[in-house]
C-alpha cells in the first residue's frame, strides 16, 4: 500500500509528463472512485482543461488544472488506495481491465487503474485539507509534535497512523520509524519523553526522505523489456529491475534484527501488524 514516499516518487514522475497536456476526453468506467463527485460533473468540469501542475499532500496527489478560457482553475484529488496506479500510456495500448478513469490527452491516455477500487480521483479535495503537517516541511516541528502527542494515551504506533497528527505515514513506515527511533510501538503516546519525541521526529524525516531517495533512483520501468512506465510497488519478481523499499523491520518477522541479530517480532495493534525488535525498542 503506497505511503508518502511512494506517492512522492509517483508525483515527481508524473509532473513533467502531464504538464501542459489538454484533456480531450473523459471516460469514467467505475463511478465509485469519483465519489462524491458525479460522473457528469466530473466529465463537464474536466473536458477541455489543461494540466498545470501536480503536488503531493500526505498520501494524496493534487492535480492542478487550468480552466477553459474564462473559467477558473481547479484541483483534482487522487488517492491510490490499496491497489491504485496512475500512469500515461500510448493510445494504441489496450486499456487494463480495471481502468477506472481514462483521460484522453491526445496521443496518450492518462489512466487511473485500480483492481479493488478503494482509491479516488475526485473534485472533492477536502480530505487533503484536514491533514496534519507535512513531515518533510518546516511545518512539522518537534515542539508542536510533542504537544500533540501529549493529548493521546493510545500506543504510539497507532497514533503515527493518525493523518491529522502528521500526514503520510501508513502501516509500513510506522514500524520503520519506531525501529529507527528505538521506541517500543506499545508505548503510550503521552508517555514519550522529550528526548524520545525528538528522536521520533528525526526518525520520521530520515526514514521518509531515504525512502523517497531510494525510489527516485530506480527508473520506473519494471515491466521486463516493456517500457510501459507503470509504477509498481514492492517486488515484481519477473521484472529485470524493480523498486523495492529498503525496509528494516516491516515484514521481517523471525529474521535477525539488523542491529542486534535478535529475531524481529510481529504483533497486532488495532487489527494491523506491527513489526519491531523487542531488544532494540525497549524505551
Ligand atoms: Zn534489535
Image (cartoon, rainbow, N blue to C red):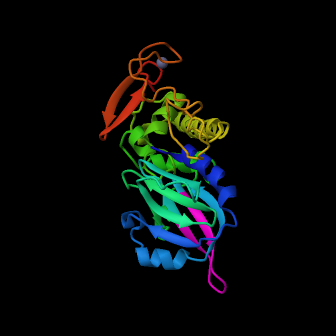
Q: Position of residue 173 (x, y in %)?
A: 49, 38
> Is residue 198 or residue 85 the one in the foreground?
85
Residue lying at the far top in this picture: please name it: 261
Q: Position of residue 130 (x, y in %)?
A: 48, 62
Residue lying at the far bottom in this picture: please name it: 70
Q: Is 38 located above or below residue 230 in the figure?
A: below
Question: Left or right: 147 with respect to 20?
Answer: left
> Is residue 2 or residue 270 the one in the foreground?
2
> Is residue 20 or residue 209 the one in the foreground?
20
Q: Quadrant of the N terminus?
A: top left
Which quadrant holds residue 268?
Answer: top left
Residue 116 part of the magenta-drawn span: no
Residue at left offset 45%, top offset 27%: 283
Q: Is 107 located above or below residue 80 in the figure?
A: below
Which quadrant holds residue 61?
Answer: bottom right
> Is residue 252 or residue 16 the one in the foreground?
16
Q: Position of residue 178 (x, y in %)?
A: 48, 33
Residue at left offset 46%, top offset 63%: 101
- The span shown in magenta is 61-76
Question: Left or right: 10 with respect to 100?
Answer: right
Total marks in image = 0
Amino acid at each position: 500500500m503506497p505511503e508518502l514516499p511512494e506517492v512522492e516518487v509517483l508525483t515527481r514522475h508524473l509532473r513533467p509528463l502531464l504538464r501542459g497536456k489538454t484533456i480531450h476526453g473523459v471516460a469514467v468506467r467505475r463511478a465509485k472512485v469519483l465519489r462524491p463527485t458525479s460522473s457528469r460533473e466530473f466529465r463537464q468540469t474536466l473536458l477541455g482543461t489543461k494540466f498545470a501542475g501536480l503536488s503531493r499532500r500526505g498520501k494524496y496527489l493534487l492535480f492542478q488544472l487550468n480552466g477553459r478560457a474564462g473559467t477558473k482553475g481547479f484541483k483534482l484529488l487522487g488517492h491510490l488506495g490499496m491497489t491504485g496506479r496512475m500512469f500515461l500510456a500510448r493510445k494504441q495500448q489496450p486499456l487494463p481491465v480495471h481502468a477506472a478513469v481514462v483521460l484522453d490527452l491526445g496521443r496518450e491516455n492518462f489512466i487511473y487503474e485500480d483492481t479493488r477500487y478503494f482509491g479516488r480521483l475526485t473534485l472533492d479535495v477536502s480530505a487533503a485539507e484536514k491533514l496534519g503537517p507535512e513531515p518533510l516541511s518546516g511545518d512539522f516541528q518537534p515542539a508542536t509534535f510533542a504537544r500533540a502527542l501529549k493529548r493521546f494515551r493510545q500506543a504510539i504506533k497507532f497514533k503515527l497512523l493518525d493523518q491529522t497528527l502528521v500526514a503520510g505515514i501508513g502501516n509500513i513506515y510506522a514500524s520503520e520509524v519506531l525501529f529507527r527511533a528505538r521506541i517500543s510501538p506499545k508505548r503510550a503516546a503521552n508517555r514519550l519523553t522529550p528526548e524520545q519525541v525528538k528522536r521520533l521526529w528525526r526518525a520520521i524525516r530520515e526514514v521518509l526522505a531515504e525512502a523517497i531517495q531510494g525510489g527516485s533512483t530506480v527508473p520506473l520501468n519494471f515491466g521486463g523489456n516493456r517500457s510501459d512506465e507503470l509504477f509498481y510497488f514492492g517486488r515484481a519478481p519477473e521484472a529485470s529491475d524493480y523498486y523495492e523499499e529498503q525496509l528494516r523491520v516491516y515484514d521481517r518477522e523471525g529474521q535477525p534484527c539488523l542491529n542486534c541479530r535478535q529475531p524481529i517480532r510481529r504483533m497486532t495493534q488495532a487489527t494491523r501488524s506491527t513489526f519491531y525488535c523487542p531488544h532494540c525498542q525497549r524505551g
